[in-house]
Each structure stands twice: as structure tokens, then as C-alpha cells.
Image (tube, grey):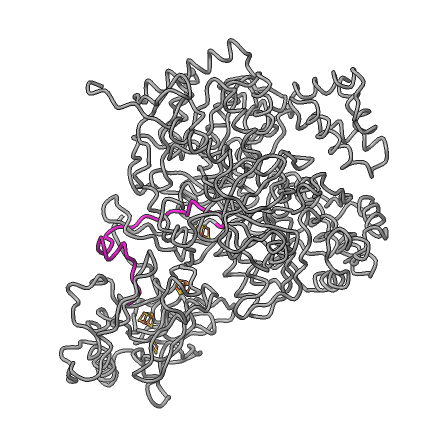
Amino acid sequence: METTKLVHMVNQIALAFRLQPKDEAVSQTVEHLRAFWSPQMRQELLAYVASGGAGLEPLAKEAAAKLSA
Amino acid sequence: MSFSKDFDQGTPVVSNPERVTVTIDGRSISVPKGTSVMAAAAQLGTSIPKLCATDMVKAFGSCRLCLVEIDGRRGTPASCTTPAEEGMVVHTQTDRLQKLRRGVMELYISDHPLDCLTCSANGDCELQDMAGAVGLRDVRYGHDGQQHRTEPKDESNPYFTFDSSKCIVCSRCVRACEEVQGTFALTIEGRGFGSKVATGAKDFLSSECVSCGACVQACPTATLNEKSVIQLGTPTGVVETTCAYCGVGCGFRAETQGDRVVRMVPSKRGKANEGHSCVKGRFAWGYANHQDRVTKPMIRARITDPWREVTWAEAFTHTANELQRLQAKYGKDSIGGITSSRCTNEEVFLVQKLVRGGFGNNNVDTCARVCHSPTGYGLKQTFGTSAGTQDFKSVAKADVVLVIGANPTDAHPVFASRLKRRLREGAKLIVADPRRIDLVRSPHIEAAHHLALMPGTNVALINALAHVIVTEGLVKTDAVKERCEPADFESWARFIANPINSPEQMEQHTGVPASEVRAAARLYATANNAAIYYGLGVTEHSQGSTMVMGMANLAMATGNLGRDGVGVNPLRGQNNVQGSCDMGSFPHELAGYRHVSDDATRELFEGLWGVSLSSEPGLRIPNMLDEAVEGRFKGLYVQGEDIAQSDPNTQHVVKGLEAMECVIVHDLFLNETAKYAHVFFPGSSFLEKDGTFTNAERRISRVRQVMRPLTGLADWEVTLGLANALGMNLKYSHPSEVMDEIARLTPTFAGVSYAKLDQLGSVQWPCNEKAPTGTPIMHVDRFVRGKGRFMLTEFIPTEERTGPKFPLLLTTGRILSQYNVGAQTARTANVAWHDEDVLEVHPFDAENRGVKTGDLVSLESRAGETTLRAVVTERVQPGVVYTTFHHAKTNANVVTTEFSDWATNCPEYKVTAVQVSRAAGPSAFQKEDRRRDVALRQVEAPHATR
Ligand code: SF4
Ligand code: SF4
Ligand code: SF4
Ligand code: FES
């Protein structure tokens, strides 16, 4: 998928959870990505984070990084 | 089934726990207090002659035919207006009565054309029946006096005629239009002999009439008569089925001659509609026999090749080979399927079974993705289940109704009629909508508040409403304490009380005066029963899911859940949106909303299906198209959906479709998507198959076959054919067996079977051991998830913003006479009301651009450009323009963008930054699309030998 779209989508998700306490916001974002994104999309996101993750909201970046776990 | 008329007890059914016993012609009966003598007699099987009474409307007492004698009372009271009283002794047949009735009939007949034998209502006319019932043998008054017989016929309505020469001025039509439909289009004009029915306009078509047909149904004579009956004759058979248009799910009697439909009459047994309907369900069924129907399967190697007709067997083998080739070459995940909310539960279930079990992945999605997916997400998070909380009837107990982002009089007309009835009884209405929809002000109805917010600011508004409730001490603390998670409530209340959520702060976003928001919040919060009804104006936003949770928060905070008259109610667009979601159409969920990663659920399905299932979510529709453009997604089975017209950013959709190697379209017509398809499976209409639909109230109703499928196979059989060509070895001999499998696998459907549906008419899920006859109202003592969960709903403005290039906001919607992409309704006489999409522009914006009503204008966004005609109107506010997406030649979705709901990817159809300018002709896209309409739709002439 186009990177800009992927970044836009994950940022939107992270923002939706940002009012939660930090840990919870991260874990809910991760949970959301696991529940709704296909493995391929999650992998692409992981790869993007590994390559620097420009444009990702800090919360999105943190959550995305946790996807491999 | 042989023909019999729907039972008519003459006056409306009364529900009252208090009962009275009366004796009628020597037999006694107990009826609810308030029941008329006429209805009590009817329940005993005694039909008292009547003309002005029908149980659709309140008794009027004008014809004087239904007279009876009552012991101890003087005179001969009208039985329709006389309530049965305890101990009453009634006589319906005496010499005196017969003489009086004959006299009445004589007067009627003396002014009536005596052409019964050739009249279109011959055999279906109450006047004729009554002449027989009272034993009328001759008419003493000459036919040469002053008469109505020369009145001209009004044939302007495409579906019914008004022949006033046959009118007996019983006013049943006028009352039906008022009481049942709530439109008030008809009046009785003049007095005495000169009185007649009038539309207040030149004719029916140019009047306020919305062609619901209630008056036609109410008319006892041939005055108001269906054109189809005039053409074909009266029906001889009847099949009970369910409307295939909107999510109201009206029950219908398909009245037939053999396997030909003569007319559709809304069924009194239909619990969603109780005998009422709209113009679509009652009249717009002609598409089923339209000449554009494709009846033979077709294949082609490239989309530029002409289609070649093949046998079903060849179509199945070819398609299975293609799909297997793609999976071998590009991997298991390179193909998928889309189920349709227009299809039955059984068909949807089979398509998702084909994808999960046959394709071996979870790449299945449904068109609910682009309409109500946020409802599923939001209500599941807060209440624990993805469905509306009430039955439609519940609105009759609401004291305040908050309608948000829905236009029921156009999109859910029969529900709108119920709602309007309640509003006329005094319930208060709050409308939150950028447009001044009809409900804001129509005959006998006026909204207490119209919160005319800017598109894209729903969450700001709902937070502001909640802020008032929390900070002004209007929370129903007991209900919250008893029923909701305390910690979640606390943090929500803290968040919402923050002044950033106050109406005063939010006004800069919503444009709604803070005082109006405060007043509306107080009205909602202090009502005994307050109910929320909402539509796609809520869901189709980048914060669609947040907004659904915001409404759920509001209802929980004010204790408005778990009883009649309250709740959070999605008005579903298509007939089976609820069902298609229930059936496991989403890529992450199996039937009954259970996540694919849940081992126990998967094992249950694996055990019965004998396959192993993937535990990973598959691709959603927009993701499939993205993956196609990237070259990884190659094959798609689309049942009953036209994504090239209905999905956002058409040019992106087309790019995705063009990048695939095997697109299979299963539809009634060669639709827009079929231009990019390699296989075409001709579909069958709802009249041609058996199955069930589940409406917005979770009501499961039967669809019954009225005629044989024109293609030879019903849609479920087509999916089965493909599945078996792929080696799945599925064996069903009837859709009822599919439902049995659904029941076995889905706890909320455990008690559902065709036998039960035949017995009860319909049931609302959950229907299982705990609720064997279904569940009209959800969350009665506790929420499905246990305790209700308040969610934080921060307002985050959409990134779709206006600017110098695109200074206006476009929002889209529907109109009464048309349905979605128009595949069906645009092929009916409904085009008399709406034959093209138009753009509503506020006079201020129009003047700035030199645009007048009727001008062709260009509508352009960063995604694309189309042209259509403008209508200058104050219905929209300055800065906002509005159109519908019913016609392919406009294809409004060329303009909408790929922005979508954060949680579900439901497209943000309701907010697009656009520019409007005068145009000389069609846009480049439209020109190219018209070329493709011809080039990509060629069909090879069939071989003589084949
Ligand atoms: S068709 Fe419906 S709206 Fe039109 S006059 Fe009859 S009842 Fe009224
Ligand atoms: S049109 Fe039919 S229903 Fe209306 S007043 Fe005349 S006879 Fe009665
Ligand atoms: S379109 Fe909707 S309201 Fe109209 S008849 Fe059909 S189900 Fe009923
Ligand atoms: S039916 Fe009772 S007065 Fe007409």
C-alpha cells in the first residue's frame, strides 16, 4: 500500500487513543492494528518504522514498533 | 398460494390490558377496551357492511352503512364509531337495518358509473361487495340528475390513476395520507354534493404527494387504482415476502397471477411496517423484468474483449480455474470477495464461507464497509454488540427524538411515518443536520431545534451536548452507577467537562449557536424517554466511529437505554446491512461478530466445515483496491455491489479493478463495475429467490420466491456452483439448510429456523434458548458486554479542509424515489421524480459564481471532476453544497476522496472540499466514462450452434 496512506491511517488510529494514559494508548493502538489490519499491512508498517518512520506520530511509531512482538 | 384479501376489522387494532365482553348477534366476545363494535364483530367473523371504515385509519362515521342496533339504546348507532362496552348486546342484522343500509347504498349507486363488468376493480371493490351485502336490487333515483361521472381521470402518477367519477367521497384516502403516511397531500374540497378529493395542485404528480400508495390501498373503489391492476387485472395469488430496498425491511404481499406480480401491497403482519410502505417498495419493482437484465453467464479474457455467453457449467469451471491460477501464481492472499447488503443472509453467509473455506483467506468484506461499519465498531465498544437497541415500534413511546445525520422521510420513509405520528402526538424533535431536511418543518411538524452544523463537526457537537449534561448536573447518576463501568465514566466525565468541549468553544467548529446546543441538551437529558436515530451522516466521516461512541455515551449518561422509547438506533441504508454484518462479512470477524483470532470460534467453524481457517484479519475493500494497484491483489468476486459507482474516489477504484486479472461481477445488470470484469454471473432479484433479510431492528424476515429465476439459478446456487467447482463439495438443497448451519454456528441465531419464521412472521435476534421468540429491545437489565463502557471522544477535525482552490464543502445523500446507485430504481418509473442528480447550492454561493438553477456546473475536488445541474436553494447553508449519487452519468463519487474513518476505513463521503463553477459540457472523466460504457460492454453475438 502507498506509504503515505499507511502513515495517515496509523496516525489517525493513534490520535483516537491519545487521551488514554500513555501505556494504554500504545497497547490499544497495537491491539487495533492486530485486530483490523492484514498481516501484509502490518509488515509494511514495521518495515517503514525500521526505515525511520518519517511522518509517524510518536504514539503511532511506538505502537508500530511493538507489532513485531 | 391462492388469493385472499388481508383481514380488515374496520377500525384500528387497540391494545389495552383492560377488556370488555360484548354479545353480538347472540355470540359473546372479549376485546380490549376501546375496540369498536365493528372490530369486535369482525373478530367474531361477522362483517358489518361498511364503506368509510378500514382498520388503516381511525373511524370517521360518515357513510352510515355500518349501523347496528344495541339493546337499551335508541336509534341505530354507527358500529365503527361506537366502542364496545361491558355487557353490550348488539344486533347487526335486522329488517330495519337492512332497509336503512339499502337506502344508503341506493344513493351511492345512483351517482356511480354502472360499468362494473369492465371496471379495473371488478371483484376487488368494496362498493360492489356492499351492494351485494345489503341486497341492493334496484335504484329508484334516476341516473339523469347531477352527477360526477364526467370528471376527467388523473393519470399523472406513474403508478396509479385517480378516476374521480368513481369516488364516493368516503375520505379514506385523505385520512390514510394524514394518519398513515403523514404527508397531508389530500383534502376534501367543497361541501355536500360538490365535495371531492383534491390534491391542492394541478394533479397528483405535481402535488405534495410522495406516492406511498397508502391512499390507493385505502380506497374502497376503483377511484385510486394501481396502473398495473388496470393493465393486468386483479390478482389471483399471494406470496408474503420482504422489501429489498431500505433497512426498514417492510413486509409485503406480492399479489400475483401465476408467477407474474400484479401489485405489491404492504402486509399488516410485517412488524416493521404494519401495513405501510413507500414508493420504492410498493411500486418500484419493475426492474425485475427490465430488458437490461442479463440472463446468461458471460466470460472474456480481457476487459476490452466482447463478452461471450457460456453455460453455467462452463462459467463455473472457467472461473475456478482462473482463481486457482491466480493463487498459484501470486499467492493464496491474492484473491478475495465482497458480499452484498442487498443479498440474503444465506447468500452472504455462503460468499464468506467460499472465501474463508475455499479461497483459504479472510479477504472478505461487505458494502457495509462504506456505510455502517463505524456503527459496528462503536456500539460494540460501548454496549458490547454491533446493533441498534430498539424495535421501530419503540418510537411511539419516545418523548424526545434526536435525529442525527439521517433523513428518514427520504431514506427510511416508513420509519419516518411512525416518527411523524409520534411527533404529531406531541413528542419533541431535535434535528442535527447541515441541511434543512424535510423533518425540520413539514405539515404539523416542527423541530424544536435544528442544529445546522458544518459537515465534519459531529463529534464537536455531541461533545458539546454531553458537556452541558455533565456540567449542569443532568447525568442520571443512578443509572450510570448501576449499569456502567465506574472508572470509565469518571474519566469520560472529567474529559467532557473540560471547557474545550463546551458549546461556546465548539461553536467555532460547528457553527451552531451555543445557546441552541444548550437548550437541545437540556431537552434531551430531561425527557422521560429520549431516543437517538442516526444515519450515514454520522458514520461516513473520519471520526464516524468516535461519533457513534459519542452518541452511546450520551444515551448511557442520561439513562436512555434498555426500555421502550429510548436507545441508539442506526437507520441502515440497505435492506440487509445488519444481516450482512451479522453473517461474518468483515475480514476480521466470523458470523456473530467473533474475531477470527478467537481459537474456540474458529475451531467450531473448522469442525463443521472440515477446513482450517486463517486467524489473521484479511483485507478490507479499500485495502484490496490499494493492494491491487500495488500488483499483489489479482482476483475479486463481487456479489450484488457496484463499487465503481458506490465507492469513493472512482478513479482509484477503477485503477484497482483494471489492475486485476479476474474480476467476477454477480449482478442483475452489467453495472459500472462490470465494465472492468472478466466474468459475469447474472443475478436474481428478490422476487426470484428464498432467503431472509435482517433489517435495522435486527428483525429477520423471510424472502419468498414469487417467480423462477430468469437465469435458471438463484444467487445462492451460483455461489454454490463456484464453490463446488473449486472443490468445496457443499451440499445444500434449500436456503433453509444454510440458515440451519448459521443457527448451529452463531449463538445469537441459535433459535432461528424457517419453521419459526413461518410461525412467528419474523424474529429479532438474539433468538436462542434465553429468548426463543427473539429480543425486541436490547440491554434491558444489563449491557451485552456486562457494564456499559464510556469512551473518550476527542474532536479531531478532518484533514479534508476547504482552501482557496476548493472553498466549499460537499456532502452527499439520498432522495426518496431513488435507491443508492440507482441500479434498480433508475430502471423504473421512479425517474418521473428524479431522473438526474442535481447539486444544491446556497443562493449566496450561487450568485458569487454566476450560477442559476438549471445551469450545468462543474463540481471539482482534488480527486476528480464531474458536471451536473445546479439547484439554488436555502436548504443548504452558505459554504455547503449537496448532491445525491443515484445516477451513473454523474457519478458523484468521482469527486469524493479516500479519507476514511480511523477505526473502520468507512469513507468520508460526507465531507469533500470542492469548487463549483459553470460548465460548458461533461468533464473529461465523464467523456471517457461514456466511451467506456460502450467499449467495455460489448456482447458477442451468440453462435447459432451453441
Ligand atoms: S400516495 Fe401517499 S402521499 Fe400520495 S396522496 Fe396517497 S397517501 Fe398521500
Ligand atoms: S378516492 Fe377512494 S378513498 Fe378517496 S374518497 Fe374517493 S372513494 Fe374514498
Ligand atoms: S424501501 Fe424501505 S420503507 Fe420503502 S417499502 Fe421498502 S423497506 Fe419499506
Ligand atoms: S363504516 Fe361506519 S359510518 Fe362508514
**Residue B455: % across, % down:** 66, 49
Q: Residue furthest bottom?
A: B74
On whether residue B246 falls in the magenta region, the answer is yes
Residue A69 appears left or right of B113: right
**Residue B802: % across, % down:** 70, 43
* Nearer to the camera, A44 or B140: A44
**Residue B65: % across, % down:** 29, 79
On whether residue B577 falls in the magenta region, the answer is no
The magenta region covers B223-248
Q: Measuring 65% from the left and 36% from the top, which residue is drawn there?
A: B900
Ligand 1 shows up in the quarter that is bottom left
* Nearer to the camera, B776 or B872: B872
| Quarter of the image where the C terminus of chain A is located | top right
**Residue B384: % across, % down:** 67, 41
Residue B317 appears left or right of B882: left
Residue B670 is drawn in which quadrant?
Answer: top left
* Nearer to the camera, B36 or B805: B805
Q: Residue furthest top?
A: B329
| Quarter of the image where the N terminus of chain A is located | top right
Say whether residue B40 is visible: no
Q: In this view, does B122 lie above or below A14?
A: below
Say whether residue B353 is visible: yes
Residue B234 is drawn in which quadrant?
Answer: bottom left
Q: In this view, does B85 lie above or below B547?
A: below
